[in-house]
Image (tube, rainbow, N blue to C red):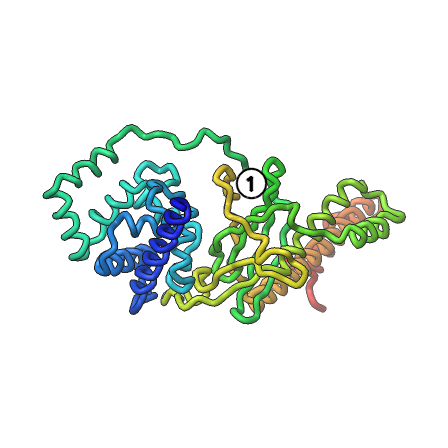
Amino acid sequence: MDLLRNSATSIQIKAMIENAMGNALEGIMVDGTPEERLQEIMTRAKESGLSVEKIFGYFNNGDLSKTHVHKDKFLEGLEKLGDNLFVINDDELIELIKKIDLDSDDTISLAEFKAYCLYSISSVAWKAERKRLEENGEMKKITDQLKQPLKKKSNEKMFPCGEKVYRTTKFFWKTSTTLEVCLFYSEALDIVTIQLTNQTSGKHLRSLCVRKKECRIDQEALNEVVSTSMENSDLDEKIFRASKEWEFCGKYIIARLKLKQSLIIPANDASSSQAVIPYLCKLCGDTTDTIAIPKPLNLESPVKSTILANIDVGEFDNAVQSFERNSRSARTSRNSAQELSNLVAEALNEIENDISPSDRLEEAANKYLPNGTPKND
């Protein structure tokens, strides 16, 4: 009975917090930075009567007993506030977390969260809270907690994301966006990291992760492709099969890769990756809403690729034509030099005859310009 009572209380607290946080979103402008929007929401939540503990509890699904939240869980909480408010890529998330996670352990403690709200948010509500805590001595306790020796939260070994196993591009007509999609596979964790890059702006979107075993491959179709391709071929079947398997796996993921438009479009970059949000949707036959999973804490991120800016087609054609002209000129000069060399050889062979070699050379030289180009008759 006590368990049911405690559970009901927890659910009620979660509902109350989420309702208050939802009300804090009303009238929030979407044209600021992620940190500016976060501070505005934290201020609204504080003004609504929520304590800093309850605001922090929002990021732990209403559990007020937890004193730490991982950065990925923190981001999930931000995204629940509304996709249009927190369209945030990996770089922006890192910069935002750096300002809150003072010991750089990828985990935000309650003390760190309190310090951020009380020191970094300059609103009247948080200044008043800081003054109250200073007067009752609570502020010193928060400061002392932050001064404690740094403790590593986990000794778990980090694993690299693995080698790049597949690359392709996909065009999304609704948002007029073309993404470069690269898959990296960590065999140790059986995790496929999906790196997404906007080909127009060259900026990276937030990476997605899936388990390879969740990517269902049509083995019959794969066997047929391999069997057909290996006929009269010297290819290594094992290597070829592995390549084709990743191609099938990539197509399975690409079929579910979608983008949704955000209301946040930076004024200085309408094609920015911040204007769209990637996600993996559910297709007919799928047993779950999405095959995407949170990035494992012990999985390293792939090195960011560099995409060259788009080349103007007209400029490319002009460059090709210029190259062709230079090539023809080079061939003409080479042929002329060869003919001149042949004439010199003939002149030397005339030594035994009555014709003077100097006359022969002069005759040959008169047929060509100084640069080796034949004179026009």
Q: Residue furthest right?
A: 232
Mark 1 residue type: Cys
State the count of labels: 1
The residue that appears at 43% across and 54% down in the rendered structure is: 89
Where residue 368 sits: x, y (%)? Answer: 68, 59
Q: Out of 299 and 139, give the one closest to the viewer.
A: 139
* Secondary element type, mark 1: loop
Q: Out of 190 and 369, give the one closest to the viewer.
A: 190
The residue that appears at 77% across and 45% down in the rendered structure is: 241
Residue 225 vertical position relative to residue 271 in the rendered view, above or below: above
- Image quarter hosting the C terminus: bottom right
Q: Out of 13 and 273, give the one closest to the viewer.
A: 13
Q: Is residue 53 left or right of residue 334?
A: left
Q: Is residue 219 left or right of residue 84?
A: right
Disc 1 residue crowd, few under 14, some 14–19, many 20+, Cα 10 Å: many
Asked if one can make out residue 65 in the rendered structure from this viewpoint, the answer is yes
Q: Residue furthest left?
A: 135
Q: Residue furthest front?
A: 1
Where residue 153 sits: x, y (%)? Answer: 40, 32
Where residue 69 sits: x, y (%)? Answer: 38, 43
Asked if one can make out residue 359 in the rendered structure from this viewpoint, the answer is no
The residue that appears at 36% across and 54% down in the rendered structure is: 14
Q: Residue furthest bottom?
A: 174
The residue that appears at 39% across and 66% down in the rendered structure is: 264
Residue 324 vertical position relative to residue 174 in the rendered view, above or below: above
Residue 266 vertical position relative to residue 153 in the rendered view, above or below: below
Quarter where residue 285 is shown: bottom right
Where residue 236 sits: x, y (%)? Answer: 80, 40
Residue 169 vertical position relative to residue 106 in the rendered view, above or below: below
Quickly name the residue at label 1: 161
Q: Is residue 334 left or right of residue 313?
A: right
